[in-house]
């Protein structure tokens, strides 16, 4: 576990399940202080309690990334209490799959609001603090869907391509802040459980059941990027099942 000087304050969005939860466990085990955000606060409270019982440091707070006010309140509470924000992991995401001609417009907007706007809200909330300190690290969870497009995933892919684009733009503008994209392939989580066209979701669930890697594999990649020295920016890690096409 790192010395006090290597121990970072890490904010994690979407920490109530899947990759966010695994990332919280991994980073807390590495000695970092994790601040957990999501809408299901009961889950966050239980996870933070488990981490503290194991000797780690964790706080939690209700967070809806679609609201800039909520994201700002989340970041300000952490900054006020802990004095700085070293890392933001923009992980919250949704994937209700459907063909474009099904016109599930509300779900398109939800994906844009959570996956894209949510990531931008996170950046807006922490960037001023990081710029004034001249240091910081933003980790955006994209997807293999930021690199390939599949039927029923047009809008989801569009949001993830956008996350990749904005991450690269922010990286080019930054000399003191690290920007990392972690792009998972099929990973065990609750991602396919909510919304979308039932047939498309069932197909995604079946593929995931056959192939998926544990969420801890993605958490390990995030932990690796964070652990590098300040002058080393891991720009992107793609982590997918060996058998995924
Ligand atoms: P989960 O569904 O298990 O986790 C998603 C998390 O996002 C939950 O903690 C959920 O919490 C949170 N979330 C959703 N909406 C909001 C919101 N409005 N405000 C705050 N939090 C929100 O899925 P994963 O762990 O798989 O997803 C994590 C990330 O990984 C996503 O960005 C996803 O796109 C990406 N990814 C996942 C892959 C996979 O195969 N699993 C593959 C590629 C990328 P709550 O509902 O409590 O708010």
Image: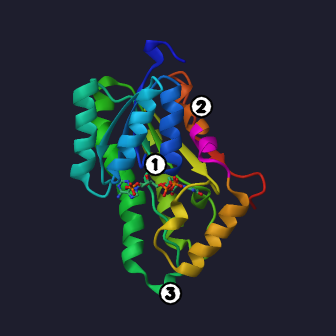
Indicate the secondary structure of the residue bearing disc 1.
loop
The residue labelled by disc 2 is 224
The residue labelled by disc 1 is 91
Contact between labelled residues 2 and 1, with CB atoms less than 8 Å apart: no
185 left or right of 161 in image: right
Say which residue appears at 32% left-offset and 30% top-offset: 131
Q: Where does the magenta region start and end?
A: 213-219
Indicate the secondary structure of the residue bearing disc 3.
helix
Q: Nearer the viewer, residue 233 or 114?
A: 114
Position of the C terminus, as image quadrant, is bottom right
The residue labelled by disc 3 is 101
Bin the neighbour count of mark 2 within 10 Å (Cα to Cα): few under 14, some 14-19, many 20 and up: few
Q: Quadrant of residue 49?
A: top left
Q: Quadrant of residue 58?
A: top left
Say which residue appears at 31% left-offset and 58% top-offset: 66
Some atom of ligand 1 lies within 8 Å of the CB belonging to the residue at label 1: yes
Q: Classify 57 as above or below 99.
A: above
Say which residue appears at 39% left-offset and 51% top-offset: 119
Position of the N terminus, as image quadrant, is top right
Q: Earlier in the sequence, mark 2 or mark 3?
A: 3
Q: Earlier in the sequence, mark 1 or mark 2?
A: 1
């Amino acid at each position: 576990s790192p010395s006090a000087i290597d121990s970072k304050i890490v904010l994690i969005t979407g920490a109530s399940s899947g990759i966010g939860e695994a990332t919280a466990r991994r980073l807390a085990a590495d000695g970092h202080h994790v601040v957990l955000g999501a809408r299901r606060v009961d889950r966050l409270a239980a996870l933070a309690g488990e981490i503290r019982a194991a000797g780690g440091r964790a706080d939690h707070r209700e967070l809806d990334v679609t609201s800039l006010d909520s994201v700002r309140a989340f970041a300000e509470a952490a900054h006020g209490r802990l004095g700085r924000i070293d890392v933001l992991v923009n992980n919250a995401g949704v994937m209700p799959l459907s063909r474009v001609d099904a016109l599930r417009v509300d779900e398109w907007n939800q994906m844009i609001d959570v996956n894209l706007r949510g990531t931008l809200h996170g950046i807006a909330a922490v960037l001023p603090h990081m710029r004034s300190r001249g240091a910081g690290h933003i980790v955006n969870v994209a997807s293999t869907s930021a690199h390939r497009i599949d039927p029923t995933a047009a809008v989801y892919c569009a949001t993830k391509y956008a996350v990749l684009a904005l991450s690269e733009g922010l990286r080019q503008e930054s000399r003191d802040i690290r920007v990392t994209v972690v792009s998972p392939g099929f990973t065990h989580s609750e991602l396919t459980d909510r919304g979308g066209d039932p047939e498309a979701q069932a197909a995604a669930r079946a593929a995931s059941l056959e192939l998926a890697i544990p969420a801890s594999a993605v958490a390990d990649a995030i932990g690796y990027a964070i652990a590098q020295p300040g002058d080393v920016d891991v720009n992107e890690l793609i982590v997918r099942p060996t058998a995924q096409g």
